[in-house]
Structure formats: structure tokens, C-alpha cells
Image: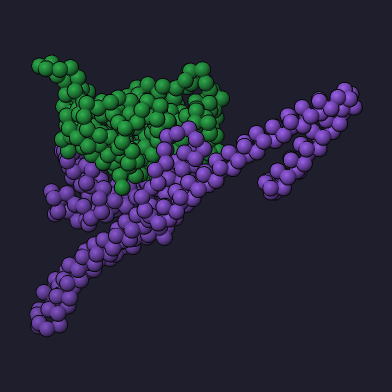
Amino acid sequence: MNLQNLPLRKFLLLLVTAATATSALLLILFYLFTGSNMTVACGVVLTAVNFAWGAVLLHFLQRKLTDFTNSLCQTLNSMIDGSDRPPVDLNAETSLSRITHRVERLYNIMQKTRRQTAEEKARLQSLMSDISHQTKTPIANLKMINDTLLTHDMPAAQQQEFFRTSINQLDKLDFLIQAMVKTSRLETGVIALEKQRGFVADTLAAAINGILVPLEKKQLALSVDCPEGMTLLHDSRWTAEALYNLLDNAVKYTPEKGRIQVTVRDLEMFLRIDVADSGRGIPESEQAAIFKRFYREAAVHDIDGIGIGLYLTREIVTMQGGFIKVDSTVGAGSVFSVYLPKT
Amino acid sequence: MSILQTTDLRKYYGAGPNITRALDGVSFCVEEGEFVAVVGTSGSGKSTLLNMMGGLDVPTSGSVRVREKELADMDDEQLTIFRRRNIGFIFQNYNLSPILNVYENIVLPVELDGDTADQKFLEGVISMLGLQDKLHNMPGNLSGGQQQRVAIARALVAKPAIVLADEPTGNLDSRTSADVLGLLQRTSNELNQTIVMITHNDSIAQLADRIIRIEDGRIVS
């Protein structure tokens, strides 16, 4: 018999009938054996008393069940209204307390999701305002240059000069917009990182390709130590982007003839990729701030950059379940360590 | 709404001229899903603070509220149940039961509550912590890092409101520390787990969302 589908009322009816029938049968048997009316009378009384206590038990259980359902409904109702939580003793060892505990957790989580959505919206708004702010300067410059070229007569040499400045500004704008597009894509979740098993060395090579030219220009020495044939479940394209940002920084902030070293190490749960340079280093007070979007250390304002690389790198690494760490001494160089999970 | 809040928390030992102020007016909040590091040198009061937050010790004055419940208002039994459901502990010396295997250790807090573990969640945690192959091992046969991973799983499995970690890498070398910390951070991100970690090591604290510095029983930044 399927207990779940059997209505309680029907079950009780069945139970009572069965009990009455068995009692009657037993009483008849008693009478047949003993032939005494007294025994039967006692039997009847006994049965009646049992039935009475049974009814009391049933009534009590019913009350309990109604109470339980009522307080559960009350809890849920007040959560729907958003009013104060009902006073349930969360720590009693009762079923109600266990259920309420979970409902309460669910409630908190839902509240949190709501808050998170609001925060995300605010973040997007600030990203938009950041973007418009950052693009203002190069656009204003370009306008000015164009106006000057249109309205003023000037020798060809000077014109050339203006065009060159204009190209500079265009480059800056292009770089900015590309970085913004990448960031906003990551931020808005348009990009889902796709983890696939691939060679770490390939990803590393893709990242290093991007810095070969400036590396040559500054005559920096690059050494790479990566165990051969090592594979990792990761998104190769975006991880390469993240590593490229670290390498690009290393090149930018290391003086000529300096040294950059990339080391890949296999830990039990993570793979560690170190990018070490012999550059200017980062003071400890700045080490937490450098990962913020559009943050630039005051001391490096003369070096090109908008403060998006490290932010992007950390996003990419975190989205893959990893983390990033920096160790640095001013004047001696920095080591950025990327940890990517192996599972 | 913050998940943990301490207000003007004080803990004094001794009396008169010999009084030791382990905590001297500590107030801060932890929000849901945050990964907070409490950093201080030894003797700064950080372990005392952790004990207060976990309801393992009673403050001289001040209040600790976890999920808007005042810990001081509960009696011993209520506190025990509250801890079991709301607080996951990770200790420096792992504190695993040596007579239970890895799986039994992990589900212990849930089973103490007369409950069964959420299997899907449990499997997720176990695979994230890389413990699939170790479930039937005894803790004594595991390395320190592996034992600490078991302790992390145990702290997470009851889906507590908050995980308190006391020097979780104190007994581990730097390689294994990175493993344990990375996993802590990952659980904070992916499972939205609120974590408060006590440490004396600044480079470890770097991984947290927020750092609270404590010196001589007071918050300095």
C-alpha cells in the first residue's frame, strides 16, 4: 500500500474498524473458551478504555501537528512580508527548529542575492562613469588638434608634429577602449571562462609572444622555467591574457638590461606561476591597492598605463577558482604569483 | 545586515595591578560572504577574540552577536547547538578524531545534529578539496595539509553561517599553506561562505577581502 497517497482520515477509519473487529473476535473467542459473562464484560470495558486513550493520543498528535504547521506558516508569512522574524527558539532540538533554521538560511541567502544584484548594478554604473571619464581626455585632445589643423595655416613640419600627437592620442584611445571592452565583458558575465585541459607551456608561450618586442627594445633578459608536458584545466585564452598583463607590467617597470623570470611550480592542489622582475618594486602600503580598477601608484604616473591590467588579471584568476599574490621589496623587484586550481 | 558583530568586547584576566587586558574594547562587523583576516602578533589578543566569536569563552563585558543572536544570552546547551549549526571551526592542529576515517570526520557535525548531510553539496566540497581518494583513510595516515583539508570540509559541511579559522596554516610549510589558503579563499568565493581567519602572517592575510589589525587587545586599523 502506498502510504504517501493514503489520506489520514481513511487510514484512521481502517485502523478503528480493524481494532474493533479484532477486539470483537477475541471477545467471542474468550466467551467460547470460558463461557463466563464476567470475562466478556471486563473485555468490553478494557477495549473501551483503550479506545478512549487512543482517542486522547490522537487528539494530542493532531494538536501538535496543527501547531507545527501553524508556526511554520507564520514563519513563512512574516518572511514574505519582510516583517520581524517570529520568535522561534532556533536552538531547541525539535523538528520545527531544524526546519526554521534552514528556512532562515534560505531567507538570508535570498536577501543577499537581492543585495548583490543591487551592488552589481552600482558597480556597472561606476564602470560606465569610469569609462566615460577616462575617454574624455584623449577625445578632447583629438578635437583640439583637429581644430588647430583646420583653422590655422602652418608649415608642413609643424603639421606633421600635430599628426604625430594625434596618432598618439588615437593609440591611447584604442588601448583604453580595448581594455574597457575586456573589463566590461568580464564584469557583466558576458564571458564565461571555458576550462579545458591544455598545456601550461602553450598558454605561457602565447602570453610571452606579446612582450617580445618591448623586451628586445629594453634588452631585458627573460628566463622561463616550466616543467615539460604539464597540463592544467584552465581557460587558455584568458589565462594567457592574465599572464600577459603581468609580463607587460614586468617589462614596463623594469629598467633596461634588467631581468624577468617566469617559474611554474606544481603544488598539491594548485599550480603556481611566478612572474618575478628586477624592477622598481611596490611599497607594502600599495600592495593591496594595485589590484583595484584604475588604480595607479602615484610614483609611476610618468609611465603609460591606466591601471586595468592587474585588476583584469585578478578577475580572470579568481573566476577560475585561483588567487594571486604579490611579494615585493622597493628597489629589488616584485614577484607576482598566480595560483590556479588543478581540479 | 551583518552576520557577526562584536560591540565593545573586553576580556580581562586577573585583577588589581596584575590585570591583563587581552581584549580592550573591540568592535567590528563581518558581512555575509566576506573573507576577513584578523592579523596580530602573538599575545595581541587575536586568539581570545576568536574564542569569544565562537562562543568558546565568555567576555568580561561587551557583546557578540552571530546572525543577530546574542551569544551571552544562551545557556551551555543552547550554545552547543548554536555552535554546531552556525559556526565551523578550523584549528591550527586540525583537531580531527583519530578513531574515525576521513568521511566520518567530515559528516560528524551534521550527524551530531541528528541530520544527514546534503549529499550533493558534500560531494562538491569533497571534490573541491581533492579528498575523493582519501575518504576511507584514517587521519593519522594523511599529511598535515591533507588533514587540514579534511578539517575545512568538516567546517563547511553543515553550511554554517560563519567559519572561524585559527592560524589554519600554523603547522604547514609554505607550499602546503598556499594550498590550504587558496582553498579557503575559493570556498569563500564559490560557496559564498563567510570566513574569519586569525593569523600573524601578513602575506597570508593578503588573500582576504579585508584585514583587521589587532594590537594589545585593540583594533589598530
* Residue drawn where x is 59% and y is 43% of the image: A62
* Residue drawn where x is 47% and y is 39% of the image: A97
Q: Quadrant of residue A324?
A: top left
- Left/right placement of residue A43 relative to residue A103 reads right
- Left/right placement of residue A6 relative to residue A99 reads right
Chain B shade in the render: green
* Residue drawn where x is 74% and y is 40% of the image: A15
Q: In this view, does A166 lie above or below B172?
A: below
State whether residue B109 appears in this view.
Answer: yes
Q: Quadrant of residue B144?
A: top left
Q: In this view, does A323 lie above or below B18?
A: below
Relative depth, front residue between B150 and A284: B150
Residue B136 in the image: state x and y as whole percent: 56, 25
**Quarter of the image with the N terminus of chain A in it:** top right
Q: Which chain is purple?
A: A
State whether residue B208 appears in this view.
Answer: no
- Left/right placement of residue B107 relative to residue A312 reads right
Q: Quadrant of residue A250?
A: top left
Residue A162 in the image: state x and y as whole percent: 14, 72
Residue A258 in the image: state x and y as whole percent: 21, 41
Residue A24 in the image: state x and y as whole percent: 82, 35
Relative depth, front residue between A85 and A275: A85
Q: How many numbered circles does the render carry?
A: 0
Relative depth, front residue between B60 and A316: B60
Q: How is the image coloured?
A: by chain
* Residue drawn where x is 53% and y is 26% of the image: B104
